Image (cartoon, grey):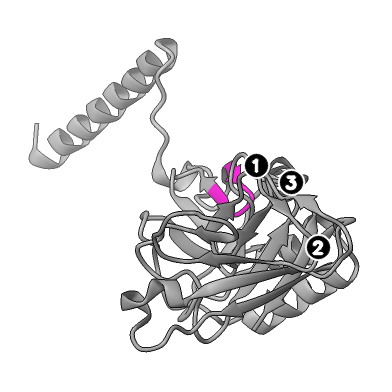
Amino acid sequence: MNSLKLEKVKSSISFIISIFFIIFLTGCGIYYVFPENQKNENSVKEVIDGDTILLNNNEKVRLIGINTPEKGQYFYPESKEVLKTMVSKKEVTLEKDVSNRDQYGRLLRYVFLDDTFINLEMVKKGFANAYTYPPDVKYSEQLLKAERFARENNLGLWQKSEIDKISIELNYDAEGNDNNNLNDEYVIMKNISGEQFNIKGWNIKDSATNIYEFEKYIFLPNTNIYLFTGRGEDKGNNFYWGKSQPVWNNDHDTLYLRDSNGHLIDIYDY
């Protein structure tokens, strides 16, 4: 047998062995999926919460430019369910801004489903707030505009509280180095109504994930409450967040004050 015929025989034997191997694996319930036949890696396997999804390739994706309630917070189930309805088990398109991943290893992306900008829709429908975090600010103006729309129309997160006569002031830029003077960064809440309120369960939140919840305290008419960022002993109308670093950005941030039902009392935006 010459060398050419020998190579042909070897090739045929290899092909037959491969076929029998595939049949054997199939019979055992074991499948090898060739790369070109894998499911699209941008298909959404699971929705983790209102701003995080898991892809078929097990990459977690954090939606850029938005922030949604954490588990246990007001409107968490609703925001998660809305995102799930929009993208679960569907193929999405991902767009990168400047950063690739966050500190938790998640991909940072804008998410699109056909012509629908998912990040924007979550904000516009009132299930997320806009979250400007440089350098990833490509769509920040659109997202802030969408938030204003949701707020003006009391959608989702922006459902208003019946308590409407609490005003807020915020000293967000402490003198000198903010990190060295945390208690010169503080919130002032003023009760300008003729009523008193038990503020247990009220909370203050920034545009990121910092949140402070008040314990029982009777907020009397025409009095103030002070919430300092740093450490100290709660006494009288002075409360301390206990943070080790500043909460409020010096260039832009938003303060949300909510009642014990999660409804919005007031916003301080700068």
Magenta stretch, residue numbers: 46-53
In the rendered image, residue 235 lying in the magenta stretch gets the answer: no
142 versus 109 height, above or below: below
Q: Residue at the spot x=58%, y=67% of the render?
A: 226
Taking depth in this image into account, of 253 and 226 the one nearest to the observer is 226
What is the tally of numbered marks visible in this picture? 3
Distance from Cα at disc 3 to Cα at disc 2? 19 Å
**Are the two marked residues, 3 and 2, in contact with CB atoms closer than 8 angstroms?**
no
Pinpoint residue 153: horizontal percent, then vertical percent. Answer: 91, 67
The kind of residue on which mark 1 rests is Lys
Q: Residue at the spot x=75%, y=44% of the render?
A: 78
Pinpoint residue 141: horizontal percent, then vertical percent. Answer: 67, 84
Would you call the spot at circle 3 few (<14 residues within 10 Å), some (14-19), or many (20 or more)?
Answer: some
Query: Can you tell which mark lies on residue 260?
Result: 3
Asked if residue 116 can be seen in this view, the reply is no
Q: Residue at the spot x=27%, y=22% of the render?
A: 17
Residue 95 sits in which quadrant? bottom right
Residue on which the image places disc 2? 221
Residue on which the image places disc 1? 89
Q: Which residue of the protein is positioned furthest toward the top in this rendering?
A: 28
